[in-house]
Image (cartoon, rainbow, N blue to C red):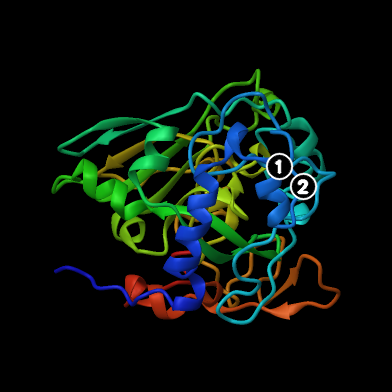
Amino acid sequence: MKTRFPAIPSSEITTEGVYLSRRKALRLGGAALSAAALAACGVNAPPPTTSAPIGPMLTPAPTPDTREPVAAKQTDELGDKLTPYSSVTTYNNFYEFSTSKEAVASLSKNFKGWPWQVTVGGLVNNPKTYDIDDLRRKFDQEERIYRLRCVEAWSMVIPWVGFPLSKLLKEVEPNAKAKYVRFESLQDPAQFPGQRDPFYRWPYVEGLRLDEAMNDLTLMVTGLYGKALPAANGAPLRLAVPWKYGFKSIKSIVKIELVEEQPTSLWMSAASNEYGFYSNVNPSVSHPRWLQDTERRIGELSRRKSLMFNGYEAQVQDLYKGMDLKRNY
């Protein structure tokens, strides 16, 4: 039986007219985007963070000393303000670089995210390999404002740019045996010094149930704040699953497989008593090291109550009908 998912609230998605006008300007981007055009938007023309091209439709990510980029909308559908670009890009869990959130931005500045290929295969009728530029051209890029909730009980509000994973999966045509989607990150200790740590089973692996992957909220991310995705945030391609804890949103993806058996993620293999497969945001189920009923929004002084499914309950609750969410954490 085909599951129907409620539409995303219109406030979460940039209106077509606004976004298309931004894309038209962005197509002029990269090295060809003039300083005059940027100045008209109130942004100084920044140099790329790396010398490699970043592909179509996205301007280079600015260096830390440039002005803050401005998104088309300033709040999410709940009225929560966006987390500033400078915070989003300098406070990250990305163990491939470092276990220090504040160190990731500097350690990632020479990361090479282009050229880049992503293979999509496994239990599909039409396996494919895409260049990152192919993905940007083939699938319409849209801006969506999502809340990001870390299992460490802090959160952000981020205007991602990308496309629904469901569009990619429909193109490769999962067969009847496919039940799960397995994602794999780049393994390259020369670029990812953290991968020299033998404690973790590299590369980073994550997984979703197929119906979770097909939910319209599940986003393949190519940028944020209208800019190319910075290396510190998972360039050039990452996942955003806003109703789950942040570690489920795997970064720097090179492989997507449709599989029959539930994948074992990196964190499940490292500490299965702490990290379950589903990892849905659930204020009533605490992590062994962090209570989950409240969270610290980056940039705010006081704590706020956490929301079931991170506030996306209407869109995803039917996925888990009849499940014990305390047992299936």
Tag 2 near tag 1, CB within 8 Å: yes
Residue 188 x %, y %: 58, 21
Q: Is residue 272 visible?
A: no
**Callout 2: 10 Å neighbours few (<14), some, many (20+)?**
some
Query: Relative to residue 194, is residue 256 drawn left or right?
Result: left
Q: Is residue 319 left or right of residue 281?
A: left
Q: Residue at x 53, y 77 (%)?
A: 311
Residue at x-position 25% and y-position 51%:
179
Question: Which residue position is annotated with label 2?
Answer: 44
Judging from the image, what secondary structure is the residue with disc 1 in? Answer: helix
Q: Is 41 situated above or below 31?
A: below
Amino acid identity at mark 1: Ala
Q: Image height check: is 214 above or below 256?
A: below
Q: Along the horizontal axis of the image, is 257 left or right of 64?
A: left
Outermost residue on the top side: it is 190
Residue 211, image quadrant: bottom left
Report the front residue among 241 and 13: 13
